[in-house]
Amino acid sequence: MTAPTGAYDAVIVGGGHNGLVAAAYLARAGRSVLVLERLDHTGGAAVSTRPFTGVDARLSRYSYLVSLLPRKIVDDLGLDVRLRTRDISSYTPAERDGRPTGLLVGGGERRTREAFARLTGSDHEYRAWQRFYDMTGRVARGVFPTLTEPLPTRDELRRAVGDEEAWRTLFEEPLGVAVEERFTDDLVRGVVLTDALIGTFADAHDPTLKQNRCFLYHVIGGGTGAWDVPVGGMGALTDALADAARAAGAVVATGHEAVRVETDGRTAEVTHRSADGEGVAAARHVLVNASPRELARLTGDTPPPPAEGAQLKVNMLLERLPRLRDTSVDPREAFAGTFHISEGYGQLAAAYARAAAGEPPSAPPSEIYCHSLTDPTILGADLAARGYQTLTLFGLHTPARLFERDNDAVREELLKSTLAQLDAHLAEPLADCLATDADGRPCLEARSPLDLERDLGLPGGNIFHRELSWPYAQEGTGRWGVETRHANVLLCGAGAVRGGGVSGVPGHNAAMAVLEAGEG
């Protein structure tokens, strides 16, 4: 489109899901809104694409599951979005006494209890598991409703949790303390810890508690901690948000990169660039749906400390799911939830220690799930009829620093090591199951943190834009957690307080901050 100029009540920099949420709320409230998106499409990291040449499979390429999106946002914006629950929570293969086995969580209480007993030889770990997740459930029910309200104080959130033991466990002590006190089995301990390490490079006993903050956001979604599959892929959600914003009157300009924001605290000008040249849009408020580092670049402020991502992302298309060495579980169940690989407690600690020393883990931990088992609509009719399936792998403890010496070589090394760890639990090599694209190449793509920084602008490849924050007010966080030092410039991306994940929460909260101001 022609470079948009003129004056708007709000200019939103970045057309990812949070920017689109903010745009839809503000436009529905009668504000004039312009969204500037650098890429030729909206959605940011929450998109669906066909990554394999000539293959009709539409994958959630980067973000892929939904937990933190409040129902309030879906209802307020009238989104046509469907989320499907997964009956199986996770499967973790193991070898005990020389035989293949594993832990299947889900499929009903009886099956889960029996799986724990079969693996560990008693009911002790299962009872500990129940008590622990009953506790996190109480925390979720107290914390989740506060995410779309003004930031509570620490004491207010503590009262909302209403459980001193839970508060100490999750908010005050390193998570490793609770894991080691409550569980004895190494594999069970590892399964619990994994939610604290998604995109977060940390030891279980890290004194900064960044692992606790990561864990918290992974167990509070919807007040239950459930992670759901978006029908049609993640792009179906962001397409619905873009449609809602446009229907309400927002102007969404793709292919337009914001390059500068100038503000006096009351009015602002946003300079943007496209293939057609530069333009300037005036605004009463500017909402930046990008990282804190990008915000600083736009405004000329001092940038925050560098962020660092810590994940290897792999997308695959298979002609069939591989058979497992553990024949007691159906692959269609094992891969429907989260399939944990090399994620025992000791394995996670060893991988962290090696990566912290600057070397790629020799046994990289990772987890896999199969979107198409829950939602076959992402596959073309022919692929679905022939039994094709997708696999999404998320590797842990692979910080960006490891890739700096040679991104391509280290990525390939880690990919090979990661798939070898998976193959150790399969009855056939994964390579034998991979589909091929129209050019005869295996349908497999891997992305390092440096690749994500290049492709999406994620600082250091960090999927949260920076370390996750506690969901309560601290010095300088402002009323909604989106405020900046410029009165009319707000941060509505994942780096806002209570940002991270596909939630729309920062977008909602930035829109509320604008509307509370009583002007455009």
Image (cartoon, helix red, strand yellow):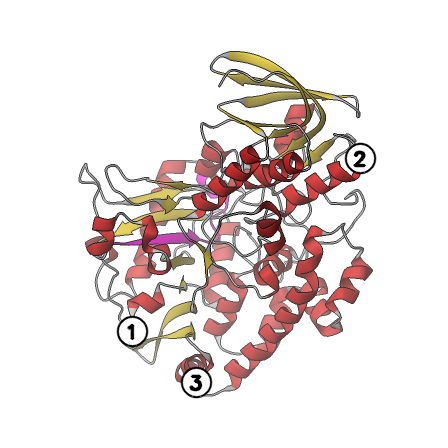
Q: Residue 34 in the image: state x and y as whole percent.
A: 61, 26
Label at residue 518 = 2
112 on left or right of 29: left
Amino acid found under the numbered disc labelled 1: Asp
Q: CA distance from mark 3 to mark 1?
A: 16 Å
Q: Looking at the image, do the residues carrying marks 3 and 2 touch, with CB atoms under 8 Å apart?
A: no
Q: Residue 318 in the image: state x and y as whole percent.
A: 25, 53
Residue 403 included in the magenta stretch of the image: yes
Amino acid found under the numbered disc labelled 2: Gly
Give residue 510's quadrant in the image. top right
The residues colored magenta run 388-404
Residue 291 visible in this rendered orientation of the protein: no
What secondary structure is found at the residue carrying circle 2?
A: loop
What secondary structure is found at the residue carrying circle 3?
A: helix
**Tally of numbered discs:** 3
Give residue 145's quadrant in the image. bottom right
Amino acid found under the numbered disc labelled 3: Ala
Q: Earlier in the sequence, mark 3 or mark 2?
A: 3
Q: Which residue is mark 1?
A: 326
Q: Earlier in the sequence, mark 3 or mark 1?
A: 3
Task: Give the residue displayed 69% in from the left and 39% down from the top.
Answer: 511
Label at residue 117 = 3
Residue 508 to residue 368: above or below: above
Q: Residue 271 in the image: state x and y as whole percent.
A: 62, 17
Residue 109 to residue 315: above or below: below
Q: Looking at the image, do the residues carrying marks 3 and 1 touch, with CB atoms under 8 Å apart?
A: no
